[in-house]
Amino acid sequence: MLLAFSLPFTAASAEDPIIQSIDEKLESVDFYYQQGSAKVMDFTDLYMEIAINEEEVEKQKVKMVFVKYQTDRDTIFHFNKQEVFYYSLDKNTLLENDSVIGNAESKAFITDHQDDYRKQITPGSLALILIFIFTTVLLFPLAVLLLQKNTPSDKLYPYEL
């Protein structure tokens, strides 16, 4: 029953032009991006000034989208990243971050999500790293101890240390 409700929502989000454009941008910019992992965590609609070129500035309706996505390194280590994207609702295009001129509302949106701007390793990958570390630290000395040949006894070793 739950699966029946979740399938239409995933299909709808995949067809959203904003998600598609974010997905395409992340695929072209981040080599480690896991395709289709972008999820909208929060958004707001604002009127913002957009720099068309060095002299020309245009006011457009922009959707600020706070997105969480996943990157994969070596197919073992998975990281969650969060980022803000700007989508022009007037031109139906994803805007470059440096072309958007911030205002008080956009600064408030970014401040609300300031603590979420970090790259986090997923719990499964963290457990794998810790297992590697503990295996190296504990098992290597244990293997040396078990495989070490018997040392000469004190009677055969006349020198004092």
Image (cartoon, grey):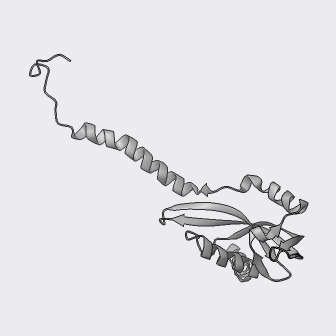
Number of numbered tags placed on the structure image: 0
Residue at left 80%, top 76%? 53
Determine the residue located farthest toward the front in the rendered image.
55
Residue beneath the point at 27% across and 40% down: 144
Name the foreground residue: 35 vs 94.
94
Horizontal side of residue 74 vs 92, given as left or right = left
Q: Is residue 139 left or right of residue 37?
A: left
- x%, y% of residue 154? 14, 20
Which quadrant, please, contains the N terminus? bottom right
Q: Is residue 72 left or right of residue 69?
A: left
Q: Position of residue 156 (x, y in %)?
A: 9, 22
Question: Residue 149's x, y, as percent?
Answer: 17, 36
Residue at (38%, 41%) from the top-left corner? Answer: 138
Q: Looking at the picture, tell me which residue is in the foreground, 86 or 158.
A: 86
Left or right, 141 with reference to 81: left
Which image quarter is the C terminus in?
top left
**What is the quadrant of residue 62 in the picture?**
bottom right
Which residue is drawn at the image coordinates 78% and 57% (left, top)? Answer: 113
Kindly give the residue lying farthest to the top in the view shown.
Answer: 160
Camera-side residue: 80 or 50? 50
From the top left corner, tell me how far across and down residue 122 is, in percent: 58, 57
Q: Quadrant of residue 2?
A: bottom right
